[in-house]
Image (cartoon, helix red, strand yellow):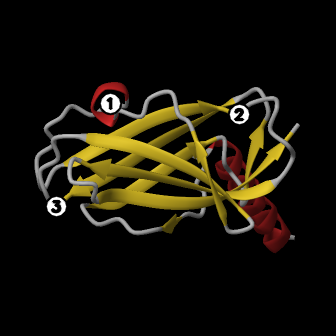
Amino acid sequence: MARLIHVLALALCVGISVILGDPVPVFHDCGSKVAKIDSINITPCATEPCQLVKGQNVSVVLEFTTNKQITKASAVVHAIVLDVRVPHEIPNPDACKDSGLKCPIAAGGTYNYTSSLLVSKSYPPIKFVVEWKLQDQDGDVIWCFQVPAQVEG
């Protein structure tokens, strides 16, 4: 009986932590060169693939550490469907102005990039991979990540 109570208490704690915890998507680094990705929080995205609901915003907070000075940073987003890259326009491509970063960014520092996208109601219900990258003034990839996603609703 005591073992059953212990198992039920553990299950309850795990359930509460899943409900209240920060979403942690599974992501793949796709060629970060100028920085190391320290953490990514995509909301909402508690499961793989990330379930993106039409008409709702998706927020990204990415912490990274740089290894060179950055004077300009531009965000580029693609949806990869059946190995075809489809560009996705974002409302704030200039990361130095619209994403919590202030350029120049010093080498060796840790910074937070933030952005949000609206999932258009016109998107079809499809599985794909989101590729999000930041490029510097020389065209070098600061960081790049991919995460599986699915449009629903």
Whether pointer 2 and pointer 3 mark residues with C-beta atoms closer than 8 Å, the reply is no
Task: Kindly identify the residue that appears in the image at 78 percent across and 68 percent down.
Answer: 7
Q: Is residue 117 above or below residue 86?
A: above
The CA distance from mark 1 to mark 2 is: 22 Å
Q: Earlier in the sequence, mark 3 or mark 1?
A: 3
Mark 1 neighbour class, 10 Å CA radius: few under 14, some 14 to 19, many 20 or more: some
Q: CA distance from mark 2 to mark 3?
A: 33 Å
Mark 3 to mark 1: distance in Å?
19 Å
Q: Amino acid at mark 1?
A: Gly
Residue behind mark 2: 119
Q: Earlier in the sequence, mark 1 or mark 2?
A: 1
The spot of residue 135 in percent (x, y) is 32, 51
Q: Position of residue 143 (x, y in %)?
A: 36, 58
* Of labels 1 and 2, the one closer to you: 2
Residue under numbered circle 1: 100
| Percent position of residue 141, x then y | 32, 59
Label 2 amino acid? Val
Q: Earlier in the sequence, mark 2 or mark 3?
A: 3
Q: Is residue 124 above or below residue 101?
A: below
Is 55 left or right of 70, judged from the image as shown?
right
Give the residue number, with chain letter if any, for mark 3: 67
Amino acid of disc 3 = Asn
Residue depicted at x 76% and y 26%? 55
